[in-house]
Image (cartoon, helix red, strand yellow):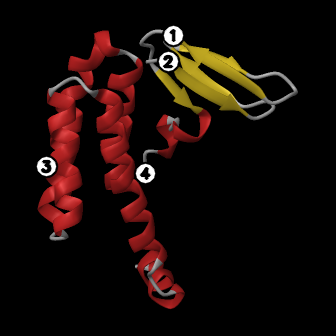
Amino acid sequence: MPLKLSLKPGEKFVLNGAVVQNGDRRGVLILQNKASVLREKDIMQSSEVTTPARRIYFPVMMMYLDEISAPKFFDEFAQRLSEFMSATQNPEIMSDCIAASRHVLAREYYKALMSARKLVEYEEQRLGNVPSGVQDSLDEG
């Protein structure tokens, strides 16, 4: 089944490890066979790996982008996922953790990445709900 990407002007994406950028107009790209594609908004730089959920997302992203090197990133993923799961009691988030693990074990890295994205979004939501006074005192301590 073909994959249709609608691209914004100047939007970057990774296609089988190559960084590609759309021109100055909206564009459509149709991929006729299986390929590793990741949009700019889903790409995380190593400097952005600053929270527990991001420490899960990043190795999954690397496994997806470089399937040959996936074993190199698996141990980091497994360790960080285990740490994250021991720190949460939210059943929905635990379910997302298990889904990410299952997808990684099945080498369904894009699906694992989408499960890991939910963890990042959950974490951002939780951190965003900290009142500013409490966050300031946490930052000072």
In-front residue for pair 120/33? 33
Q: Would residue 55 be seen by someone viewing this image from the given angle? A: no
Residue that carries the numbered disc 4 in the rendered image: 50
Q: Position of residue 136 (x, y in %)?
A: 51, 82
Determine whether 134 is above or below 67 in the image. Answer: below
* Circle count: 4
* Front: mark 3 or 4: 3
- How far from the left and from the top, in percent, is residue 95? 17, 56
The earlier-in-sequence mark between 1 and 2 is 2
Give the structural element (helix, strand or loop) at label 4: loop
The residue beneath circle 3 is 82
Residue in the image at 76% along x and 25% along y: 27
Residue 17: percent from left, percent from top? 50, 13
Task: Indicate which disc, 3 or 4, sits on the residue closer to the N terminus.
Answer: 4
Q: Quadrant of the N terminus?
A: top left
Q: Residue at x 13, y 49 (%)?
A: 82
